[in-house]
Amino acid sequence: VVEDAQGSKAPIQRLADKISGIFVPIVVGIAAVVFLIWYLWADPGNFAEALEKLIAVLVIACPCALGLATPTSIMAGSGRAAEYGILFKGGEHLERTHRITTVVLDKTGTITNGKPLLTDVLTEMDETEFLA
């Protein structure tokens, strides 16, 4: 289960992949244009300076951190949860945990049955007032 969670893509990871697929070719194109402008017009014939400008554009615009951080955080999160006995079926489920407000477990501390059973009602009101 842990391997499945670490291998599946969360929605944020799919979004990062989609953005990177568009962003990277555009950045490479811009870097090539910067190189040509620098080499042909700004400082004609100075290959080293033009190459430096090309590299600067690539370094500044590189989405590598986004592309690497997303799967790394999912692997780290699901691995850490597994150490505590919490297994996620996929990265999407791990990503949704920030929305959890209440967790209800059975007497053994596990969620084993998909059919809830009400055993107690806890209110701040008096029981007779609540049931009336």
Image (spheres, grey):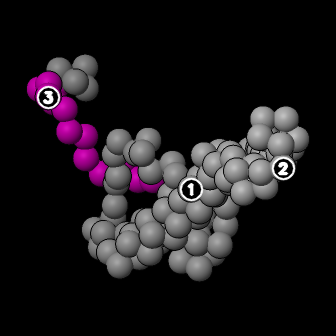
Placement of the C terminus among the 4 image quadrants: top left
Q: Name the N-terminal-most of marks 1 and 3.
A: 1
Say which amino acid is labelled 2.
Answer: Gly
Q: Which residue is mark 2?
A: 45
Which residue is depicted at the point 34% across and 54% down? 104
Task: Name the image quarter holding residue 47.
Answer: bottom right
Q: Which residue is mark 1?
A: 65
Q: Is residue 123 left or right of residue 91?
A: left
Above or below, 71 relative to 19: below
Which residue is depicted at the point 77% across and 51% down? 46
Say which amino acid is labelled 3.
Answer: Glu
Q: Nearer the viewer, mark 1 or mark 3?
A: 1
Task: Name the image quarter holding residue 34.
Answer: top right
Callout 3: SS? loop
Q: Which mark is residue 17?
A: none
Q: Nearer the viewer, mark 2 or mark 3?
A: 2
Q: Name the N-terminal-most of marks 2 and 1.
A: 2
- 19 within the magenta span: no
Work out whether residue 53 or residue 98 is closer to the camera in this orientation and state it.
53
x, y percent for residue 129: 17, 20
Sort mark 2 into few (<14), some (14-19) or many (20+) by Cα contacts within 10 Å.
few
Callout 1: SS? helix
Callout 2: SS? loop
Tell me the distance, in whole angstroms, between the alpha carbons under discs 1 and 3: 49 Å
Q: Name the N-terminal-most of marks 2 and 3.
A: 2
x, y percent for residue 22: 82, 44
Q: Is residue 69 left or right of residue 81?
A: right
Magenta region: which residues?
116-128
- 121 within the magenta span: yes
Q: Which residue is mark 3?
A: 124
